[in-house]
Image (tube, rainbow, N blue to C red):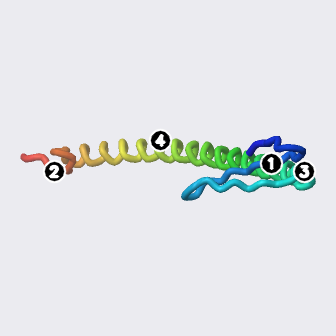
Amino acid sequence: MGNHQRPSILLQVETRRKSSRINVLRGRGVRSLMAEIDAIERLEKARDRWAEQEEREECDEEERAFGKWFDEVQYEADAAMAQAGFHRHKGQWRRKRK
């Protein structure tokens, strides 16, 4: 979004991309109101990005804790299988020969 000076008229140009460029021109009275609306929209988007980042960080922390717990359980299960006389062959548990 930018301001363009034309002879005796100050216009605000908003460019949106869809399939091609579309310019929307606004005059002086609307310019300040639209600038305030744009500023509010930018703040709302920033707030939403911040909230999403916080949520991602919280989920990552929970995922790390779950991964640590799962690794501990997997270690205990592997130890129990080895104690029962099994071994791993290509990722599969097999009973040891006697």
Residue 94 falls left or right of residue 46: left
Q: Tell me the element at label 1.
A: strand
Quick one: 64 or 88, which is closer to the camera?
Answer: 64
To which residue does mark 4 refer? 68
Q: CA distance from mark 2 to mark 4?
A: 26 Å
Dot in front, 1 or 2 = 1
Q: CA distance from mark 1 to mark 4?
A: 55 Å
What residue lies at 67% left-to-right and 45% top-to-bottom? 54
Quick one: 50 or 64, which is closer to the camera?
Answer: 50
What label sits on residue 94 in the rendered view?
A: 2
Looking at the image, tell me whether mark 1 or mark 4 is earlier in sequence order.
1
Q: Which quadrant of the view contains residue 50?
A: top right
The amino acid type of the residue labelled 2 equals: Arg
Q: CA distance from mark 3 to mark 4?
A: 60 Å
Bin the neighbour count of mark 1 within 10 Å (Cα to Cα): few under 14, some 14-19, many 20 and up: many
Q: Tell me the element at label 3.
A: helix
What label sits on residue 83 in the rendered view?
A: none
Q: Tell me the element at label 2.
A: strand
Q: Are marks 2 and 3 in contact (CB under 8 Å)?
A: no
Q: CA distance from mark 2 to mark 3?
A: 80 Å
To which residue does mark 3 refer? 28
Looking at the image, tell me whether mark 1 or mark 2 is earlier in sequence order.
1
The amino acid type of the residue labelled 3 equals: Arg
Which residue is most to the bottom? 19
Q: Which quadrant of the view contains residue 78?
A: top left
Residue 74 falls left or right of residue 58: left
The amino acid type of the residue labelled 4 equals: Lys
